[in-house]
Every structure is written in C-alpha cells, then in structure tokens.
C-alpha cells in the first residue's frame, strides 16, 4: 500500500522516544523505543527491539475526513453547565442524534458547546466520517 502525503513525527524525552507515522490526516503507526533502542536504530542495527508498536486507524489511510456541525436538544430542565449529569446526558443525546454512518465528537468543554433556546439546554458539536 502506498501512503498519500506520508508524514513522520519523532518525539523524544529522557525516558522514551515515540515515532508516529501518518498520511497527513490520520496517525496509524506509533513506535515506542527506549533511548538506547533509538540509538541502536540510528546506528543502523538491524531488527532493533522496541518497547511497543501500535497499529491503528488503518481503515482511514488515504481517506479524506469530512465534517459538519450538528446541534441537538439536551434537556428542558437542567441548565447548569458544571453538572456531571448534564455531561452524561449530553453524550447520550449526542449519540442518539448522530446519523448512521457518521461518528460524533463527544467533546463538550468549550464555551460554545452549550446554548439555550428559551429555557431548554441545547448542545453543539461536529459529526464526521471518512470517504
């Protein structure tokens, strides 16, 4: 498989080196190494052991992410944003409002995530899918 727009990120700290591969939109391989293993790999030592290799999001490789906004009613009675129950209720209602074939962003921590229509609490987020 040829990756369109291949990208690599190498992040280091004193305990670990992380190498991430992506297609510019989706990360799909994450390699973790100790500093010693990273040094061995840089010195061209073949088949260097790794702490871990994670492969994920392979179904998204070379696909474009499209998104659009969605808003939905959360509650007629709860209007306090710091309420833990409101967060759980919002996530539940968001999943129910999400059209089939789409995924929904369940982050509701920004200032414009909630708004009011009269005395009702509504929420705003994004839905997305890969094509």
Image (spheres, rainbow, N blue to C red):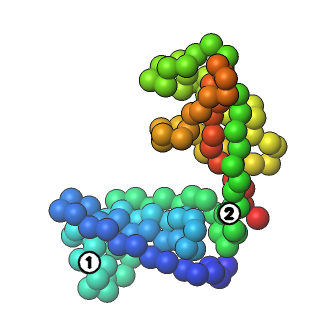
> Would you identify the image quadrant in which residue 78 lies?
top right
Disc 2 crowd, CA 10 A, few/some/many (<14, 14-19, 20+):
few
- Residue 66 as seen in the image, left or right of residue 38: right
**Could you tell me which quadrant the C terminus lies in?**
bottom right
Query: Helix or strand or loop: what does disc 1 sit on?
Result: helix
Contact between marks 2 and 1 (CB within 8 A): the answer is: no
Q: Position of residue 57 (x, y in %)?
A: 61, 59
Q: Is residue 23 visible?
A: yes
Query: Helix or strand or loop: what does disc 2 sit on?
Result: strand
Residue at left 49%, top 25%? 81
- Residue 15 as seen in the image, left or right of residue 65: left
The residue tagged 2 is: 65
Q: Does residue 5 lie above or below 67 as drawn?
A: below
**In terms of depth relative to the viewer, which is nearer, 10 or 119?**
119
Residue at left 48%, top 40%? 111
Dot 2 or dot 1, earlier in sequence: 1
Circle number at residue 114: none
**Could you tell me which quadrant the N terminus lies in?**
bottom right
Residue at left 75%, top 48%? 102
**In terms of depth relative to the viewer, which is nearer, 57 or 25?**
25
Q: Does residue 124 lie above or below 73 as drawn?
A: below
Question: How many labels, in total?
Answer: 2
Q: CA distance from mark 2 to mark 1?
A: 37 Å
The residue tagged 1 is: 40
Q: Position of residue 54 (x, y in %)?
A: 48, 59
Q: Position of residue 114 (x, y in %)?
A: 57, 33
Disc 1 crowd, CA 10 A, few/some/many (<14, 14-19, 20+):
some
Residue at left 62%, top 28%? 116
**In terms of depth relative to the viewer, which is nearer, 73 or 21?**
73
- Residue 72 as seen in the image, left or right of residue 5: right
> Would you identify the image quadrant in which residue 90 lies?
top right
């Amino acid at each position: 498989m040829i990756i369109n727009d291949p990208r690599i990120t190498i992040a280091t700290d004193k305990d670990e080196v992380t190498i991430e591969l992506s297609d510019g939109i989706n990360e799909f391989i994450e390699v973790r190494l100790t500093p010693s293993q990273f040094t061995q790999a840089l010195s061209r030592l073949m088949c260097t052991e790794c702490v871990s290799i994670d492969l994920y999001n392979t179904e998204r490789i070379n696909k474009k992410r499209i998104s659009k906004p969605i808003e939905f009613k959360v509650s007629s009675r709860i209007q306090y944003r710091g309420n833990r129950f409101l967060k759980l209720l919002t996530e539940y209602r968001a999943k129910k409002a999400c059209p089939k074939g789409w995924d929904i962003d369940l982050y509701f921590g920004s200032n414009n995530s909630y708004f009011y229509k009269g005395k009702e609490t509504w929420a705003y987020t994004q839905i997305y899918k890969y094509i």
